Image (spheres, rainbow, N blue to C red):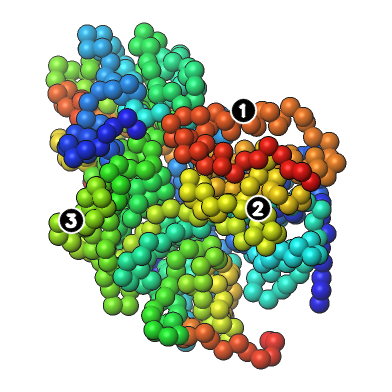
């Protein structure tokens, strides 16, 4: 994982390390931290592909205001991965186009 | 499931301005609810590893992230007067009913009925147009700070920074502190926009600042692999030959725009103000907008600095608490305005002063 | 910022954060007194009027004169300066240095602020950089302190005396 090892000013206190899946692949991240952070630390930069021109999109604003980081999380599309906390066993998938909203609540 | 929560003072946004407004109003006895869309309060303060400028009153010499702790300690010391709800976004304002709607996470919705509200929603990063500016790897400067300063994730190996205002200069230094190489900082203007001392710090480390240069294209197949930059003449026309710089992150520090949707929805009187970097609400000197129940503070009122955001938050919190009938310390109002005027008095405050006078009204009729 | 920023090289450098000549807020101490002063004098490079005054409020002797207006550039009363270096640690812009010319015939000691990893250790040889980050000499680390216990390290480095007008940073190589 691409984590900062020693910082001159800051000390990082990560929470519990958990496993989640990205497009079926097992990955590790820290519980409670935004999904996008875990993806970035695992060198995943492409989060979705746009509907019309099939452009790859990823992280941009990190404060939930731009919509670039939308992914399908546990079956639900358009999840703002930059402000949504990671949980153990979470299923994170690249969103293709607008995604399909599940018709029934989980 | 129409759940409604009620509160005296709603503060939308738990950053520098919002936390100060909450602390001030709660200190006067108001019941305050702060709604913060991030997973923790503190806003942009939390990411600032550098020591703040200003004076002792604005915690000069203290690192930004410690200032967030100081404000949260103050709020905690007021007992249970302030409730901070994180991971919650205010999604709209309905003027017919005078209520706000909020969304916790991605699923839980509810309504908020507040007697008075301070909207301190801050700002969002701007982007400039160039081919491939939508590719992963083009990140806002604040986003890069979140990665490396909040969550300890390496943002990339080599960065091109676009913009030499305070944010571009500060984030470049922070990238270096995180062990990331800065290939260059490009700035279209003939001089840096940020403080000279911020630039001096990074020039001493050998980081190039290319004045009168801009980015003309981002290069990459699926993610950023490079940036093409070119020189500009004094009419901002491209001259010379483009140069490609290898990099995996292009960091955008080209300005912020106030986040003001809620004011529009509330029907507040707005104005486009270039010096304040976008559309902002008119306000009187209590920071009240044309809507008698809504105040504004921080970057949402005009892009400025953390120190000004904190004082504006105090003024808005004070005034909203007073409007609620709380017992306020009358002298504070003048003290806060004196501090704000001092911060804005110098040459670097000229632009702000020019902007504020366009949107400051003497008072409201209602 | 007080510059006209035409294509003149000196202006271009100053407009991108490089000091090219002495000016208010960025001056050198009076030479004669400086050569005799054990402990050194403060050298501040802060030529822009910005709302900031911790150098003055943190100076224990008033050598950095109290500001009249928070936007003032720092001005020094050299009679009061003890070379303590508190301002070096306190300045948010990392713009304060202390330079002692009495170390030896052709060496001086510069105290500078340092906030990177790896941290240098006493006795270590480091690269000395000028205002545009070019390596202009080697230096030996004399002391490493953290006066305010706030992650700003103050490093004293022995450098060639003839380069005291140029060296303003170090590079630590492991």
* Residue at 66% across, 28% down: B335
Labels 1, 3: one chain:
yes
1 or 2: mark nearer the eye: 2
Q: Please tell me which residue lies in front, C131 or B242.
A: B242
At numbered mark 3, what does the secondary structure look like: helix, strand or loop? strand
Q: Please tell me which residue lies in front, B268 or A45.
A: B268
The single residue placed furthest to the right in the displayed view is B325
Whether tag 3 and tag 2 are in contact, CB under 8 A, the answer is no
Taking B186 as reference, is B359 above or below it?
Answer: above
* Residue at 35% across, 11% down: C78
Q: Please tell me which residue lies in front, B147 or B186.
A: B186
> What residue is pinned by disc 2?
B269
At numbered mark 1, what does the secondary structure look like: helix, strand or loop? helix
Q: CA distance from mark 3 to mark 2?
A: 43 Å
Q: Percent from the top left, x then y, of residue B337?
A: 64, 31
Q: CA distance from mark 1 to mark 2?
A: 26 Å
> What residue is pinned by disc 1?
B338
Q: Earlier in the sequence, mark 1 or mark 2?
A: 2
């Amino acid at each position: 994982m691409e984590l900062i090892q020693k910082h001159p000013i800051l000390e990082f206190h990560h929470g519990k390390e958990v496993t989640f899946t990205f497009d079926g692949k097992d990955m590790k991240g820290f519980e409670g931290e935004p999904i996008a952070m875990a993806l970035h630390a695992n060198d995943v930069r492409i989060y979705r592909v746009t509907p019309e021109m099939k452009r790859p999109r990823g992280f941009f604003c990190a404060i939930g205001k731009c919509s670039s980081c939308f992914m399908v999380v546990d079956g639900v599309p358009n999840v703002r991965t930059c402000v949504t906390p990671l949980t153990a066993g979470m299923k994170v998938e690249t969103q293709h186009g607008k995604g399909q909203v599940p018709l029934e609540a989980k | 499931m129409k759940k409604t929560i009620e509160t005296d003072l709603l503060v939308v946004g738990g950053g520098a301005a919002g936390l100060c407004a909450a602390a001030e109003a709660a200190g006067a006895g108001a019941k305050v609810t702060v709604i913060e869309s991030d997973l923790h309060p503190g806003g942009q303060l939390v990411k600032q590893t550098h020591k703040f400028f200003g004076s002792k009153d604005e915690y000069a010499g203290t690192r930004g992230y410690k200032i967030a702790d100081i404000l949260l300690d103050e709020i905690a010391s007021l007992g249970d007067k302030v409730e901070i709800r994180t991971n919650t976004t205010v999604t709209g304002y309905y003027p017919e009913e005078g209520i706000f709607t909020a969304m916790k996470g991605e699923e839980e919705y509810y309504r908020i009925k507040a007697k008075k509200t301070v909207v301190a929603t801050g700002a969002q990063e701007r982007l400039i147009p160039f081919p491939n500016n939508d590719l992963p790897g083009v990140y806002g400067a604040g986003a890069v700070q979140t990665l490396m300063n909040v969550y300890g994730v390496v943002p990339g190996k080599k960065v091109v920074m676009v913009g030499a205002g305070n944010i571009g200069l500060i984030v470049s230094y922070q990238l270096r502190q995180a062990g990331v190489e800065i290939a260059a900082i490009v700035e279209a203007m003939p001089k840096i926009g940020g403080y000279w001392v911020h630039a001096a710090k990074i020039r001493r480390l050998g980081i190039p600042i290319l004045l009168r240069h801009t980015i003309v294209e981002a290069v990459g197949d699926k993610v950023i692999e490079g940036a093409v930059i070119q020189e500009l003449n004094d009419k901002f026309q491209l001259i010379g030959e483009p140069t490609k710089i290898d990099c995996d992150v292009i960091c955008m520090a080209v300005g912020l725009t106030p986040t003001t949707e809620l004011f529009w929805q509330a029907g507040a009187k707005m104005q486009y103000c270039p010096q304040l970097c976008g559309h902002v609400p008119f306000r009187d000197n209590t920071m009240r907008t044309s809507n008698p129940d809504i105040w504004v503070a921080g970057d949402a009122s005009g892009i400025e600095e953390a120190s000004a955001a904190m004082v504006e938050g105090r003024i808005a919190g004070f005034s909203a608490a007073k409007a609620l009938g709380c017992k306020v310390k009358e002298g504070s109002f003048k003290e806060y305005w004196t501090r704000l005027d001092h911060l804005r008095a110098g040459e670097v405050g000229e632009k702000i002063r020019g902007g504020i006078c366009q949107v400051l009204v003497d008072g409201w009729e209602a | 910022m007080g510059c006209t920023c035409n294509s003149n090289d000196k202006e271009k450098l100053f407009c991108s954060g490089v000091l090219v000549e002495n000016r208010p807020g960025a001056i050198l101490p009076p030479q004669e007194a400086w050569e005799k002063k054990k402990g050194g004098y403060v050298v501040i490079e802060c030529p822009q009027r910005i709302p900031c005054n911790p150098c003055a409020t943190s100076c224990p002797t008033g050598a950095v004169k109290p500001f009249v207006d928070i936007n003032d550039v720092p001005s020094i009363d050299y009679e009061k300066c003890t070379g303590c270096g508190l301002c070096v640690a306190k300045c948010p812009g990392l713009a304060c240095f202390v330079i002692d010319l009495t170390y030896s015939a052709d060496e001086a000691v510069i105290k500078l602020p340092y906030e990177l990893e790896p941290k240098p250790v006493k006795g270590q040889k480091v690269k000395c950089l000028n205002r545009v980050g070019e390596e202009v000499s080697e230096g030996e680390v004399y002391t490493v302190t953290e006066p305010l216990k706030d992650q700003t390290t103050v490093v004293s480095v022995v450098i060639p005396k003839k380069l005291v007008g140029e060296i303003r940073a170090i590079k630590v190589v492991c």
